[in-house]
């Protein structure tokens, strides 16, 4: 435990910290439940859990304003919960039911919410990167002051389209924050086996895009970096890169033989760097909350998550007619 | 109440598995996240983590048990204050799978029944046979060719240290080393281009796409660089190489990960396209594909990887590209299919024979060049034809066969050809919709009844 080194920042209120704690815990418990439902056969296909990475989205959402946009990969459950999407709707999509965000037609990897400005949920590694820049392009075109958070992984950072996008985002000053969630592995490939230079935050240098490296296990550090990035983008200076160092505890997806790293490596991360435990320590040592308070929070969150699982089990399968809907949009009358 | 720990589903296609090892015993305290067992799935040995916390009350399924169905209770977890004696130990019977479970349709390997043996096998009579999965057959084929030709190498994502995302290249890094079994970054357009360049330079690359869905990132190099160079260079240089990987729908992986590219690649002059169903064809065609002086698209199927078939035991067994296989002889109707479509075709033929309809089933195996002669000869005999594939209906392989039959066997047709295909929709995720989106054995039977007016 000694190695946990998060310090209370003087400018952080206890309420704020407590909110981050809740938001991260909701993601963790939700993902544990999703893993459980997968094991029971209620969730199918691929299911990529976000456990360990919670501080990334929670910190960045704290830096976002209403109307800002976000887009990510298939590892998307945490992003959806953090931007305020309903756990019931997310879980029901995971079980492929009509009350899911995509009426059961998208699944774990493909969910969207126009209301929450969440643009997916993409299954093709790095495809969301130009799409995110495109959202930023639309914002700039409409001069609406919004920014887009475009999330992708360390593995995705090797795809060519990322650099094509960097170039255009830079020449057109697009208000796009490229968030590289560097969890150090792309499936079974550790970052040192796939990249010639490990410092992903410097990948924008050739295009003149500033970047910084962030401790992704420290929610406040993420939030502060997010605020710098947002300020840069919103003031019209163009894109910004955040390389956020994080770690996924679970396998890449549910079917991952996990032979590429040791159990000890994962355990060490959990013991020493866990983003939720770090905030918990600060809350307790700073006497911002008691053990009982935190227990009550945990109980409350478990209730929400269990309710989402019940909702997702009870919700009906989509009507067979849904097979043929949403293929083409109707022209407006 | 004790909590039942259930046999988990650990992959999209897993229905049962082997409980290889318990890492806990009765009386142990576990908390969520602890590794409690090792389970062998169809793809790999995986660690199974506890979800709930408590004390292990009893172990219901001993380690080493094979064929344990998903959702069988395998152990009991006691909650606070419970003791092992409080709990009545239920018999370890299989729990029924939830009605909407991800379990893919169970197909019988009907080909293994002797009466269904192909009438014209690709091996001499009396050849010894062995049972192999498609997965093993593919690995053997690549390994045999790599042993005999130094210029053959394999590249792709997770093919080496990870032993293959679908375990096709298992063990190959050990045998051939990292010079020839090459892990790439996630950079399909880039490594496909590098492989095409390497083929210009005198090597014979095998490019594995983790799935063919991701080959869309690389399709420019496959078509513009690999398929057209021989022609553009007036025959001076071409691309002797193989692009391979799983194609088509797996189970519940949604629209971006479930697409059949058979018709896409079959459209392109300069490419050869093969799509085996059996393990023997997977092996024999893979060896031919590697030796072929042209770019060959080799379409595999995740659901078929684990299926077992007879494979001839021969030093050097190959199947020629461009030759169809008559999988079952019949006289009333010709069913033409390929790849996993053959499961539906063979199942339909078996059911139809019970009602007195004799179906001839042709497995195309190669889509380009396509052995249309075998199809035409068959239709001249049966006068009716149904095609079966999982791809979209517009511009389908079946459309092409219909056109060929109209031109070459019009006078022999007693009914319009019917194409059974996947539905004209992106693949939905929901279990019920996914089933409807694919073609089914029943649809094939219905089509046969229509063309035979029965
Ligand atoms: C174009 C493409 N290639 C391959 C895949 C298969 N695949 C899915 S996720 C993944 C690893 C991605 O790793 P990373 O970008 O680091 O993200 P993480 O999973 O760690 O969040 C791969 C190879 C894919 N979905 N799309
Ligand atoms: Mg990663």
Image (spheres, rainbow, N blue to C red):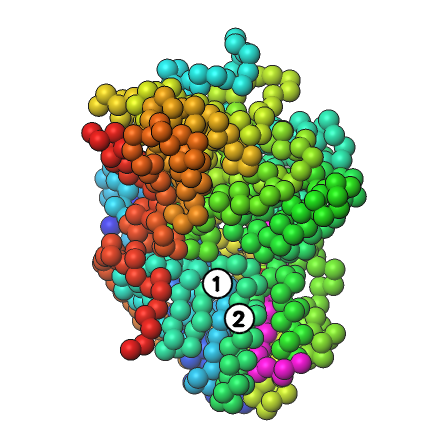
Residue at coordinates 42% horizontally, 51% vertically from top-left? B253
Label 1 CA crowd tier, 10 Å (few <14, some 14–19, many 20+) = many
According to the picture, the residue beneath numbered tag 2 turns out to be A131
Q: Give how far across and how far down residue B43 sits, in percent.
A: 50, 39
- Is residue B228 positioned above or below A128 on the image? above
Task: Work out whether B290 lies above or below A195.
Answer: above
Q: Is residue B179 above or below residue B286?
A: below
- Residue nearer the viewer, A231 or B301: B301
- Nearer to me, A304 or B27: A304
> Quadrant where the C terminus of chain B lies?
top left
> Where does label 1 land, which residue?
A122
Residue A179 is covered by the magenta coloring = yes
Image position, residue A248 (x, y; %): 54, 60
Q: Determine contact: label 1, label 2, CB under 8 Å.
A: yes
- Horizontally, residue A48 falls left or right of residue B356, namely right
Q: Is residue B77 visible?
A: no
Image position, residue A185 (x, y; %): 60, 57
Q: Classify mark 2: residues with Cα within 10 Å, few (<14), some (14-19) or many (20+).
A: some
View extreme (top): residue: B126
In magenta stretch: residue B187 = no
Judge from the rendering whether residue A44 lies leftward or rightward of residue A282; answer left or right. left
Which residue is drawn at the image coordinates 74% and 60% (left, top)? A196
Q: Who's the residue at 54% across and 85% down the image?
A: A140
The stretch in magenta equals A171-188
Please tell me whether mark 1 or mark 2 is closer to you in this view: 2
Distance (Cα) linking label 1 and label 2 = 10 Å
Q: Position of residue A328 (x, y in %)?
A: 36, 65
Report if residue B294 is visible in the image. yes
């Amino acid at each position: 435990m000694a190695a946990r080194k998060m310090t209370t920042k003087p400018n952080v209120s206890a309420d704020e910290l407590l909110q981050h704690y809740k938001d991260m815990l909701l993601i963790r418990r939700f993902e544990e439940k999703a893993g459980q439902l997968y094991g029971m056969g209620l969730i199918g296909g691929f299911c990529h859990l976000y456990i360990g990475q919670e501080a990334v989205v929670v910190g960045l959402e704290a830096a976002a304003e209403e109307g800002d946009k976000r887009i990510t990969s298939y590892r998307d459950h945490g992003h959806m919960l953090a931007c305020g999407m309903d756990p019931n709707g997310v879980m029901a999509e995971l079980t492929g039911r009509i009350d899911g965000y995509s009426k059961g037609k998208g699944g774990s990897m493909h969910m969207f919410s126009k209301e929450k400005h969440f643009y997916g949920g993409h299954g093709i590694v790095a495809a969301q990167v130009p799409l995110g820049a495109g959202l930023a392009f639309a914002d700039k075109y409409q001069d609406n002051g919004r920014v887009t958070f475009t999330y992708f992984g360390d593995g995705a950072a090797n795809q060519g389209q990322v650099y094509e996008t960097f170039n255009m985002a830079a020449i057109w000053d697009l208000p796009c924050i490229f968030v590289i969630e560097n969890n150090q592995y792309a499936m079974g490939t550790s970052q040192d086996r796939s990249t010639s230079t490990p410092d992903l935050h410097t990948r924008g240098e050739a295009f003149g895009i500033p970047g910084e490296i962030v401790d992704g296990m420290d929610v406040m550090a993420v939030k502060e970096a997010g605020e710098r990035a947002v300020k840069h983008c919103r003031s019209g200076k163009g894109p910004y890169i955040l390389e956020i160092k994080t770690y996924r505890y679970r396998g890449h997806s549910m079917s991952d033989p996990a032979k590429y790293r040791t159990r000890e490596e994962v355990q060490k991360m959990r013991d020493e760097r866990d983003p939720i435990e770090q905030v918990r320590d600060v809350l307790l040592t700073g006497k911002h909350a008691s053990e009982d308070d935190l227990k009550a929070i945990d109980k409350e969150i478990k209730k929400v998550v269990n309710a989402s699982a019940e909702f997702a089990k009870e919700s009906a399968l989509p009507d067979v007619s849904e097979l043929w809907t949403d293929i083409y949009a109707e022209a407006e009358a | 109440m004790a909590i039942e720990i259930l046999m988990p589903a650990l992959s999209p296609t897993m229905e049962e598995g082997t409980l290889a090892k318990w890492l806990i015993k009765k009386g142990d305290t576990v908390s969520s996240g602890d590794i409690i067992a090792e389970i062998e799935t169809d793809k790999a040995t995986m660690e199974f983590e506890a979800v709930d916390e408590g004390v292990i009350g009893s172990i219901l399924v001993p380690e080493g048990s094979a064929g344990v169905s998903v959702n069988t209770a395998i152990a009991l977890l006691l909650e606070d204050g419970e003791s092992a004696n409080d709990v009545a130990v239920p018999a370890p019977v299989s729990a029924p799978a939830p009605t909407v479970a991800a379990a893919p349709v169970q197909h019988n390997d009907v080909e293994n029944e002797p009466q269904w043996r192909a009438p014209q096998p690709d091996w001499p009579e009396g050849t010894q046979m062995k049972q192999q999965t498609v997965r093993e057959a593919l690995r053997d084929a690549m390994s045999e060719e790599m042993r005999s030709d130094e210029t053959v190498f394999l590249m792709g994502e997770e093919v080496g240290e990870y032993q293959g995302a679908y375990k096709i290249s298992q063990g190959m890094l050990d045998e051939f080393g990292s010079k020839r079994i090459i892990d790439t970054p996630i950079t399909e357009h880039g490594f496909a281009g590098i492989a095409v360049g390497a083929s210009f330079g005198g090597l014979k690359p095998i490019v594995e796409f983790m799935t063919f869905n991701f080959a869309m990132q690389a399709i420019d190099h496959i078509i513009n660089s690999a398929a057209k160079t021989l022609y553009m260079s007036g025959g001076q240089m071409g691309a002797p190489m193989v692009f391979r990987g799983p194609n088509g729908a797996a189970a519940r992986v949604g629209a971006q990960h479930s697409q059949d590219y058979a018709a896409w690649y079959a459209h392109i002059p300069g490419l050869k396209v093969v799509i085996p169903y059996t393990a023997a064809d997977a092996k024999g065609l893979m060896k031919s594909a590697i030796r072929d002086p042209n770019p060959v698209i080799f379409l595999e199927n995740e659901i078929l990887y684990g299926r077992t078939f007879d494979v001839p035991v021969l030093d050097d067994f190959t199947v020629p590209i461009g030759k169809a296989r008559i999988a079952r002889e019949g006289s009333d109707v010709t069913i033409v299919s390929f790849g996993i479509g053959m499961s539906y075709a063979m199942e339909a033929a078996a059911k139809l024979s019970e009602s007195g309809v004799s179906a001839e089933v042709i497995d195309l195996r190669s889509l380009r060049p396509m052995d249309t002669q075998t199809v035409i000869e068959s239709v001249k005999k049966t006068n009716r034809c149904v095609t079966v594939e999982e791809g979209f209906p517009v511009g389908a392989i079946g459309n092409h066969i219909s056109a060929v039959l109209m031109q070459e066997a019009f006078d022999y047709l007693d009914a319009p050809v019917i194409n059974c295909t996947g539905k004209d929709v992106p693949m939905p995720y929901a279990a019920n919709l996914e089933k409807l989106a694919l073609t089914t054995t029943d649809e094939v039977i219905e089509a046969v009844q229509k063309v035979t007016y029965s």
